Image: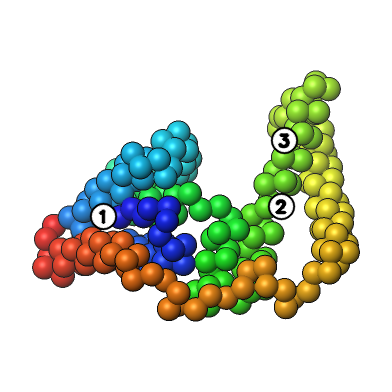
Amino acid sequence: MSCDRRVDARLRVALAGVASVVVALTNAPAALAWLLLTAAAGAAIAVLLREARWREVLRRMLAVNGFLVLVWLTLPWAWQDGALGWSADGAALALTITARTNAIALALSALLAGLDAYAIARAAAGLGLPVKLARLLLLTVRYVDLIGETRRRLDRAMRARGFVAGANRRSLQVTAQMVALLLAHAITRAERVELALRARGFSSASAGLRQVHAGDVPRSHWAWAVGTTGALAVSWALMLLGVR
């Protein structure tokens, strides 16, 4: 479940979408284990082929599993007979969610290795996504990161002035002011970007993210699709056969 950088980006994005849906619909433990194993193998192959850097993959997986800690702190517990106790059903559900999330994250790391936001947006437009939505996706990825950098600068400035967040009225006021400043900054930046685009003759009919015909995908690239589809088919076969 891995793709070479030379494989058409539209094919890779389509495979990533199909793999995510299949993993999300899989319930059988054996099928989930197979998907998790093949996704991990695909990510490892991408790292070995230098399509992805292992530090980025590891950082992404740590972020994903950091969120899953909250799942394990809530789902496996239930209020039974007037006391908080361990729930086997909740633990099984948490385990399923963990396996699905890690399998999807690893599969996307393998299939989309080496693609930036522009390449993904252009591939989505080539798959039939309206060009305006694809362009909106590209701008969102770009400027969410810029707004995040602005928030980090504000946070450093507040800490340099001795601000320490706490459960008090002053902290609430400062946090509200920072959120308002971020919104004002985002609106101002959006207006400047719009003026810059107009000054450069931008129009909704521009071909920056032009559609590409599906027939332009080289036939040799479909071998990657066959391999990924085969891995997904094995998981569904395990589920249909009732393998636990």
Q: Position of residue 165 (x, y in %)?
A: 72, 29
Of tags 3 and 2, the one toward the viewer is 2
Q: Residues within 10 Å of mark 3 (few under 14, many from 20)?
A: few
Q: Residues within 10 Å of mark 2 (few under 14, many from 20)?
A: some
Compute the Cα span from label 3 to label 2: 14 Å
Residue 185 at least partly seen? yes
Q: Position of residue 227 (x, y in %)?
A: 25, 61
Which residue sits at x=41%, y=36%?
54
Q: Residues within 10 Å of mark 1 (few under 14, many from 20)?
A: many
Residue 21 at least partly seen? no
Q: Mark 3 vs mark 1: which is more N-terminal?
A: 1
Q: Which residue is mark 2?
A: 143
Between residue 227 and residue 27, name the one nearer to us. 227
Between residue 181 and residue 54, name the one nearer to us. 54
Q: Are marks 3 and 2 in contact (CB under 8 Å)?
A: no
Compute the Cα span from label 3 to label 1: 37 Å
Compute the Cα span from label 2 to label 1: 34 Å
Q: Which residue is mark 1?
A: 35
Q: Amino acid at mark 3?
A: Arg
Q: Mark 3 vs mark 2: which is more N-terminal?
A: 2
Q: Is residue 242 above or below residue 51?
A: below
The kind of secondary structure element at disc 3 is helix
Q: Is residue 82 left or right of residue 32?
A: right
